[in-house]
Each structure stands twice: as structure tokens, then as C-alpha cells.
Image (cartoon, rainbow, N blue to C red):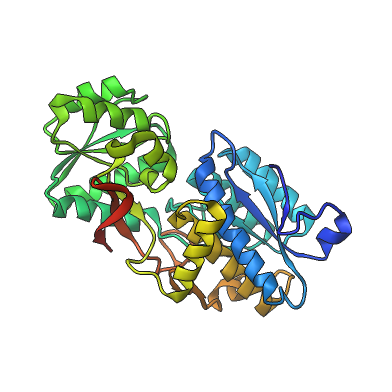
Amino acid sequence: MSGMVTEARLPGRDDIDAHVRIGVLVPLTRPGWGEAGRHLLAGMELAVREVNDAGGIAGRPLGLVVRDTAADPDRAAAAVDELARLGVSALAGEYHSVVARAVASGADALGLPFLCSSAVIDALTERPARWVARLPPAQSHGWRIYADFLLAAGHRRVAVAAQPSLYWASGARILRDHLAARGGTLVDLGLREPAPASVCDALAEQDASALLLLVGHPEPAVSIVRSVRRDRRLAEIMIGAPAGQPEFAQWAASLGGDGAAVPFLRYLPERLGPLGARVRTALRERLAEAPSFVAFEGYDTVTVLADMLRSHGAGRAPATETWARVSVEGTRGRIRFSRTPDTGVWQWPGAPVQVVDRDPAEPGRFRVLHTG
């Protein structure tokens, strides 16, 4: 799936030009996390349908011009240039942090508004950006809440199996610093490529009560979980996955009961309001499964951009006004943006953060373990 205008899938250039267009970048094929991309896009498409049912943008239909990033920063950067040439009014999307960085850099250089839907790495841009905003909380905020959960649950010595990447390294640093300041310790198992057997052997040598998986999904995450669950030496070890791998149905389908009781970060409130509950029902029908928090992020992304485009028109508004004047009700609360000097982008400071897991008694049900 290289590109489309939703909802109508219009093939002709004249028909496409009748739309106010948002350029969307999402991972839909491997090595990207396609399940996350599918949920993100489903939320966006639902919001587009509702915007158009309500009259569109100044009487013009809203459309999404979609590009599959496949988790490739170079591919995403090229797509940004292409979408700018096509005359999109704004950019949206992306789940993978390293890809979102490439999109943010290109968008800011072009003076094209980019609302990051689902990537959390703090350093989304190398320098303060005028044109970039973000819906999810910065990684330093969410992962500190996760560290607080670990400490409250009695985990003072925590092991981590991490693959090499900027995102995983950033997460490990946040956890290590936050735990150390409160008397805890993060132990890196030191495995460049964490294979299941090597993770189990290395973990057995540590006096750790928890193992955090900072690794790709489905592999090697699924295989590591299976191996740890079956290793008698590790029967008392809690497995955690702060990046959210257990959120998606593929995790439960692959692991069944072994995938339960693996705490992760989720960006939903404990209770959805009327809008969130209605959108949840519509997303479940659209996806034919329970919507993840990423689907809600997709819906809220389009809701914000539609509000912005109604206020300023389809042309590019001044950067400061673009984000500073946003105030819109999303599925997870009222969304407003403020400048955050630690991340350099416009940030929604009210994004909800939970630590949840799948209930061992009913793996299709989530338990809220901690909120921040």
C-alpha cells in the first residue's frame, strides 16, 4: 500500500485536488510494526469519515494521502518531500521513533506542520522545532512512571535485554537514572543480539526480580517470553515490556497465557468519556478486534488537524498559531499544546499514562496496575 486518499480512494488528480489533504506516514509492512500502523490508520480513517459527514473543511472533503514507511527513516524522509510536492496541508502519523525523527526534521525544514501521533523518543528533533507537535507523552515522562511502578511493586534490581537502537538505549538510560536515584539498579544483560537461551542463562546469573524486554516484536520478544516462562530457574521473574508490545492482539495470539502478567505502558485514561466510548465501539467494528491505544491516537490526530485546518484554512498557518491555539476534545481528554524545552517540540502535556497487563485469568482483559 503505497498511497491513497481516504475515504473515497479517488484515482483522478482532479478528484484528489478537491480534497483538503493530510499526508500520513505509517508502518504497514515489515520490518515495520504493521499491526500498530494498521490501528493508527484505522483511527485516522474513522475520524476523516466523521469530519466529512459533518461537512468537511470549509465545505471541502478531508482526505489522507498515505505512505508506508516500513520503519525505514530514509523511505520516510523521501515520502515527506513527495507529500510536500503534492501540496498536503499537514503531515501526521508514525509509530517508530527513529522514523518519526526523520519525518519531524524534514517537515520542520519545509515549514510543514507535522503532528506526531505515536512516537515518544524525547529528542524528536535535533533543535527546537516550530512546526512539530506530538500527542503521546515524551519517553522520559512515561518510562519514569514505569520505573515508579517497578519500585512500588518491590523490584529494586531489574535486568534488561536490549537490542541496539537509539530508542532502546534512550529508554534504558531513563530507567537506569530514575531507579538509581531511588535506590534501585538496572542491570544490562550485555547481549548484543538477545537470543532466548542466552537471555535465560544471563538472567539466571543475576540477582534480579524483573526482566524488561527492550526488543522487537514479534521476534525476539515472543521467543524470549516463552523461554523465560519455561525455565525453572526463572519461575519468580516478572517480565515487563514498557514499549507496549502486549497491547496488540498478535501478542495474545502468539503467547496465550504466557503473554499475560507482562506490564507495559498504555496511553489511555482509566475510564473513557462519551466520545472515547463511542469511538471505541466504532473502532472495534472497523478493526474487527479491540482497538489499541494507538487507534485512539490516530483518531485524535485527525481531530486536532481538522480543528487546525478549520481555524486557519487549508493553507499553511503561521507556526506559532498552528499549535498554540489548538483546544479540541479528543477521545482521551481535551488536547492543548505547550512548548517543552526538554523535547524541542509542541507537546500535549495532558496525555494519560497507565501501566497495565493482561489478566492471567482472562488474557483478553487488561488490568490497570499503576497510573501517572
Q: Visible in this render: residue 337?
A: no
Residue at image coords 61%, 75%? 307
Q: Where is residue 322 drawn, in percent x and y? A: 61, 72
Residue 108, placed above or below residue 264: below
- Tell me the quarter of the picture where residue 8 sits: bottom right
Asked whether residue 74 is in view, the answer is yes
Residue drawn at x 67%, y 76% as measured from the top left: 54
In the image: residue 92, left or right of residue 236: right
- Name the image quarter holding residue 277: bottom left
**Image x and y of residue 280, in percent:** 47, 63
| Rendered residue at 28%/36% (across/down) | 258
Q: Position of residue 69 (x, y in %)?
A: 61, 42
Left/right placement of residue 56 relative to residue 30 reads right
Location of the N terminus by quadrant is top right
* Quarter of the figure with residue 56: bottom right
Quadrant that contains the C terminus = bottom left
Q: Is residue 187 left or right of residue 301?
A: left
Q: Position of residue 52 (x, y in %)?
A: 69, 70
